[in-house]
Amino acid sequence: MLTQLALKHKTHDFNEPCIMGILNVTNDSFSDGGLFVDLESAKRQAEQMIHEGAHIIDVGGESTRPGAAPVSEQQELDRVIPIIEYLSDAIDVSIDTSKARVMTEAVEAGAALINDVCALQMDGALAAAAAAHVPVCLMHMQGSPRTMQHNPSYADVTADVYQFFEERIKACDIAGISRELLILDPGFGFGKTSAHNVALLRNISAFEKLDLPILAGLSRKSLIAEVINKPAHERVIASVALAMLAWQNGASIIRVHDVAETSEALTMCHYIKSFQGEG
Ligand code: 7PM
């Protein structure tokens, strides 16, 4: 099992939970809509997450919300590049994008990791990621952000996602992206019903056979709203519970909005899991 990932600032040892803090530099995200649009507030939000224990800051300038309007390449660059330049001296920054040019320029600006919800399927993305020589998160999505929640359907969601991972790993290999740079993500909420999300969360360990780190993003997602009828910003406790389950089931990187709370809970989980001594 691969247990390490070398980024710019740190080689992350996956015996310990790795926390990725979400920084949306859009103005239309469902959970922090309009709050972090300007550079100064984005910087403050990122610094808070670093202080709270984030290992990676995931910078995204394009909303992937179901039904969201697409953002132009230039608009996305204008949003993300200044914050990446500012943060990348202090912490490992991940660029959440599907666009080849944004990947290239973000890595030039200092990004240490590419997080692509389209798993490098957009025009030029495979080549851009290969040239960037940084780790890449390949996320599974059924359909496109605009239509993915209309009628998600699978023969066997875990087997289908597994097969998708195998195909994308192969495509990366052909494009010259070395396997040690890959991270896999089942894409909770991306073209999935609650039943699909539950199956994937229970079956995360099924992906361990692929011998690559798994990233899980469940923070504040609508799966929670189906159980606990609360708006996004009141889903913190439930999100921490899901983060713990994902980590327990084998995910190495946990993508979250609420870094302090998740960090404290996962530190406790790690303590229990790795405790050695008399009992
Ligand atoms: C609206 C709906 C806004 C959903 C934002 C979202 C993931 C991701 C996102 C994930 C990886 C969110 C999502 N989710 N990247 N980007 N994995 N790798 O809740 O699960 O942040 S966007």
Image (cartoon, helix red, strand yellow):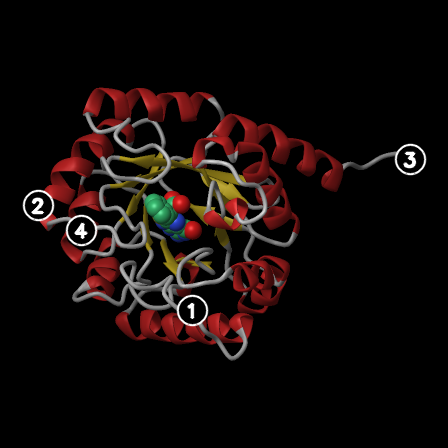
- Of helix, strand and loop, which one carries label 2? helix
Q: Establish whether ligand 1 lies closer than 8 Å to the Cβ of label 2.
A: no
* Tag 3: amino acid: Gly
Q: Residue at x 19, y 56 (%)?
A: 99
Q: Residue at x 12, y 37 (%)?
A: 78
Side of 206 relative to 279 (left or right): left
Going from N to C along the chain, the mark reached first, 1 or 4, is 4
Q: Which residue is mark 2?
A: 74
Q: Which residue is mark 4?
A: 104
Q: Residues within 10 Å of mark 2 (few under 14, many from 20)?
A: few
Task: Find out whether the residues at labels 3 and 4 contact each other: C-beta distance under 8 Å.
Answer: no
* Tag 2: amino acid: Gln
Q: Nearer the viewer, mark 3 or mark 1?
A: 1
Q: Position of residue 34 (x, y in %)?
A: 25, 30
Q: Which residue is mark 3?
A: 279
Q: Position of residue 24 (x, y in %)?
A: 30, 36
* Tag 4: amino acid: Thr
